[in-house]
Image (cartoon, rainbow, N blue to C red):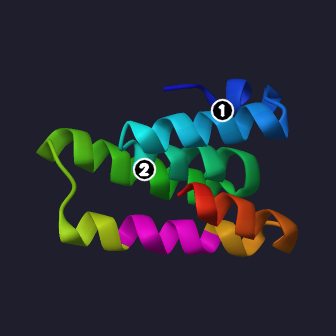
Amino acid sequence: MKTQKQIKQLTQEQFQDVLIDNTAKNYHTENVIYLAYRYGTRYHVAYAEMIHFAELKIGHMTPVLIKKRNEVLDMVMNNMLPCHIKTLSECL
């Protein structure tokens, strides 16, 4: 996983490449964390990291965790500029 500082230093193109690569690896929760790093609040980051921690502890995503991950993703995407939403939605 990359740090918040590393994610914020990426260009938009590099950031999208990270999201695409993670999607290919089925790292959807990591993508939500990275989106929160760039576009969310501290609450969004903490919420996404909590979900990731629970996923790692359990060893897989549960339907409840998927629902929570989708909730935080929706919150983060609502913070983003509308012009980014379509491009990122296609990547996820």
Q: Is residue 64 left or right of residue 4?
A: left
Residue at 64 percent of width and 51 percent of height = 35
Q: Which of 2 and 54 is in front in this view?
A: 2
33 magenta-colored: no
- Which residue matches tag 2? 28
Residue 21, above or below 41 = above
Report the amino acid beneath label 2.
His
Report the amino acid beneath label 1.
Gln
Q: Name the spot of residue 41 as percent of width and height, x first.
A: 69, 58
Q: In which quarter of the image is residue 6?
A: top right
Residue 72, above or below 7 = below
Characterize the magenta stretch by its predominant secondary structure: helix
Q: Which of marks 1 and 2 is in front?
A: 2
Q: Is residue 74 left or right of residue 51?
A: right
Q: Quadrant of residue 37?
A: top right
Q: Earlier in the sequence, mark 1 or mark 2?
A: 1
